[in-house]
Image (cartoon, rainbow, N blue to C red):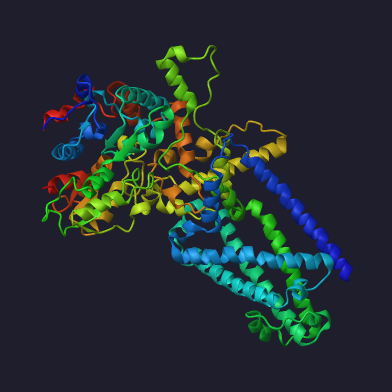
């Protein structure tokens, strides 16, 4: 499978219908790379006219801004918006809710206005339109699955249903945690916590959340954010349950269930 | 005698209102300590928020049982104020049940409704006291509330119960006096009311004079209680009964995920990248982020004064839940405490004299700020649209940009973003390496 880049298309006088914004986690983190690959596989399989920025992509500046470093954020925003506008990018799909939030809410007032869609909403649309066809007897059919709401998808942007609709399409038995949707508990990674040691407390946030997810008796914990994925995977490991429980991104589940 | 009562009543009302206006003025002054911010946009949407969140108490119903009980207290408070209007007019004109002859049968309907509400208020307040003091819900036993804030809550609940009891006893003694055909009570015969009739047996053994004393006593204590409550408000977290309305009106209209932009820095970066755009003559560098309450916006201050310290924010906060020092409720309480400290400083000195203290460090510690995951759970839960996260992020901006105060890992992360365009130490050349491994 060949992953097209915007630069290559541009050299041929073309531009992609949709830019797949991979994000730093999706590009560099080994676990998150699997999510990126799964999503790219889906896009490839159903012949979506897409491309990535490749080496031209940079951090959106989200962790710097949330940590308080507005200068660093503005530097990154300036450079990314320059690149995106120069290529005339109209539509962006991303597997990272943090990048999604930045594009949707924070770049427009800096001069970067694009149609932005999170990959779970995109997958839901493609399933609804019949472009993604799922196997009759998929591997998640009837399986107990719980969904962990990403804060930057859920509370931050009100997207609660799209990932659940996709799980429904997989015929999974969705078991909700008590703290779900707008009451969902954070995985502990947001606000640049991912990049520092947790403050002193009685329990790690990711362990508290993983315990709740494990408590649903699900064999899969579905996530829609590479950072949530890391935190929950670590939590399941800490709880010594990695043999029976997998933390998977919605995209991975769809990719594994396509005809 | 009647005249003396009227004069006393007018003087008392005037004093109560004067004192309240004076203290309310101080609160407005303290809210305006914050920097300016234009929130005059989208009046339609703001009206909708105020109707839904403040009048309709939409978010209180996230817990339906508590939502209903709180609604009783709220409706009781608002609706029984119609009765207070009659009490005030009776007090000024020396009349008795002024509205009764005007409204006829509808008057009894009104008073009956008030009595039912009064009973519901008492029931709700008793349940609330039990939740706080006997069941000891976690958000009510947290150290945030140690001392005055915990007593404050109990005083408010007890006062409401006492005020409602006065109102019911007043009606019970009045209707008993009517039945006995005593002077002007009988002239304004209303007949028994729906609930206070059951209190009559308690009072029926009393002589006519004693009954009049009870009726007059309840009348005076009820209205004195209301005036006292009015003047207690500016000193209490109970101020939310007033400020919830403007606070819902001015609540954030954009998605919760959006952080406020800093145009000063946006421009600084723009001029660094495109020097040809820079205006001639340098501007004085502004202060970045917030160190003290004057650096926050007036909306942050309105938030602080609207907070009734219910703790729904902290009960949902991943940091608080997992035993970190951060508690969003404490962020709001600290902001208000510091604003009041500055207010007192201004009252004493005429204008603010530097006291060597600030919201950051003296009230809110670095460890608290560092524990926030920016998950917006606190913002989501607040029934009156308070945004603790906005304050946390402004303080973080000051810490990092003015004090260069960041944990070593964050400093490393900033360096990585600057040099490698990713928060981790990977070469930018490897960003698309995954594509070759497919």
> In the image, is residue B208 above or below residue A73?
below
Q: Nearer the viewer, residue A144 or B346?
A: A144
The percent coordinates of residue B348 (x first, y second) are: 71, 38
Q: Nearer the viewer, residue B415 or B83?
A: B83
> In the image, is residue B27 above or below residue A91?
below
Residue plotted at (42% across, 16% down): B272
Q: Nearer the viewer, residue A58 or B316?
A: A58
User: Does residue A224 appear anywhere in the picture?
Assistant: no
The percent coordinates of residue A41 (x first, y second) are: 15, 38
The percent coordinates of residue A45 (x first, y second) are: 13, 39
Specify the quadrant of the image occupied by residue B105.
Answer: bottom right
Q: Nearer the viewer, residue A197 or B401?
A: B401
**Is A136 displayed left or right of A179 in the figure?**
left
Q: How many marks?
A: 0
User: Does residue B296 appear anywhere in the picture?
Assistant: yes
Residue plotted at (58% across, 69% down): B121
**Is A243 displayed left or right of A117 in the figure?**
left
**Is A221 displayed left or right of B42 in the figure?**
left
> In the image, is residue B408 above or below residue B252?
above
Q: Quadrant of the N terminus of chain A?
A: top left
The percent coordinates of residue B397 (x first, y second) are: 45, 31
**Is A160 displayed left or right of B215 in the figure?**
left
């Amino acid at each position: 499978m060949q992953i097209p880049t915007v630069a290559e298309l541009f050299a041929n006088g073309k531009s992609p219908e949709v830019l797949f914004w991979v994000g730093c986690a999706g590009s560099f983190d080994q676990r998150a790379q699997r999510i990126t690959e799964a999503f790219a596989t889906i896009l490839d399989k159903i012949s979506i006219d897409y491309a990535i920025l490749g080496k031209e992509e940079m951090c959106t500046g989200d962790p710097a801004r949330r940590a308080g470093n507005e200068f660093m954020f503005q530097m990154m925003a300036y450079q990314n918006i320059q690149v995106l506008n120069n290529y005339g990018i109209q539509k962006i799909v991303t597997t990272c809710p943090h990048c999604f939030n930045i594009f949707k809410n924070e770049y427009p007032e800096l001069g970067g206005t694009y149609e932005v869609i999170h990959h779970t909403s995109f997958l839901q649309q493609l399933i609804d339109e019949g472009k993604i066809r799922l196997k009759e007897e998929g591997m998640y059919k009837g399986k107990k699955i719980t969904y962990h709401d990403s804060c930057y998808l859920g509370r931050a942007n009100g997207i609660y249903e799209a990932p659940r609709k996709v799980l429904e399409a997989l015929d999974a038995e969705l078991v909700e945690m008590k703290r779900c949707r707008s009451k969902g508990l954070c995985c502990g990674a947001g606000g640049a916590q991912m990049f520092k040691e947790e403050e002193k407390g009685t329990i790690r946030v990711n362990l508290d959340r993983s315990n709740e997810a494990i408590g649903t008796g699900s064999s899969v914990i579905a996530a829609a954010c590479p950072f949530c994925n890391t935190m929950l995977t670590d939590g399941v490991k800490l709880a010594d349950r990695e043999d029976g429980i997998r933390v998977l991104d919605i995209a991975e589940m769809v990719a594994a269930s396509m005809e | 005698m009647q005249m003396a009562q009227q004069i006393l009543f007018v003087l008392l009302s005037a004093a109560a209102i004067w004192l309240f206006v004076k203290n309310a003025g101080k609160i407005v002054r303290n809210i305006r300590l914050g920097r300016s911010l234009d929130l005059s946009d989208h009046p339609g949407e703001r009206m909708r928020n105020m109707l839904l969140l403040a009048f309709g108490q939409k978010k209180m119903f996230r817990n339906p049982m508590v939502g209903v009980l709180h609604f009783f207290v709220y409706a009781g408070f608002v609706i029984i104020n119609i009765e207070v209007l009659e009490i005030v007019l009776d007090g000024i004109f020396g009349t008795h049940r002024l509205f009764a002859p005007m409204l006829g049968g509808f008057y009894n309907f009104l008073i009956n409704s008030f009595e039912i509400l009064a009973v519901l208020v008492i029931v709700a307040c008793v349940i609330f006291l039990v939740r706080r003091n006997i069941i000891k819900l976690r958000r009510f036993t947290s150290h945030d509330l140690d001392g005055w804030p915990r007593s404050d809550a109990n005083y408010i609940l007890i006062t409401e119960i006492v005020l409602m009891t006065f109102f019911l006893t007043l009606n019970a003694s009045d209707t008993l006096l009517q039945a006995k055909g005593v002077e002007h009570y009988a002239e304004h015969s209303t007949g028994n009311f729906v609930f206070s009739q059951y209190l009559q047996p308690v009072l029926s053994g009393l002589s006519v004079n004693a009954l009049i004393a009870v009726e007059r006593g309840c009348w005076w204590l009820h209205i004195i209680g209301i005036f006292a409550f009015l003047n207690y408000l500016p000193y209490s977290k109970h101020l939310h009964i007033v400020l919830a309305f403007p606070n819902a009106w001015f609540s954030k209209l954009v998605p919760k995920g959006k952080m406020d932009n800093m145009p000063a820095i946006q421009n600084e970066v723009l001029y660094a990248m495109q020097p040809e755009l820079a205006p001639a003559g340098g501007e004085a560098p502004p202060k970045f982020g917030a160190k003290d309450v004057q650096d926050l916006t007036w909306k942050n201050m309105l938030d602080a004064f609207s907070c009734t310290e219910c703790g729904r924010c902290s009960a949902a906060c991943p940091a608080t839940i997992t035993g970190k020092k951060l508690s969003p409720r404490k962020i709001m309480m600290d902001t208000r405490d510091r604003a009041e400290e500055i207010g007192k400083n201004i009252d004493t000195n005429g204008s603010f004299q530097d006291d060597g203290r600030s919201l950051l460090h003296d009230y809110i510690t670095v460890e608290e700020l560092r524990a926030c995951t920016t998950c917006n759970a606190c913002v989501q839960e607040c029934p009156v649209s308070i945004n603790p996260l906005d304050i946390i992020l402004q303080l973080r901006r000051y810490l990092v940009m003015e004090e260069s105060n960041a944990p070593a890992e964050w400093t490393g992360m900033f360096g990585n973003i600057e040099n490698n365009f990713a928060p981790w130490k990977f070469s930018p050349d490897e960003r698309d390496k995954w594509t070759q491994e497919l």
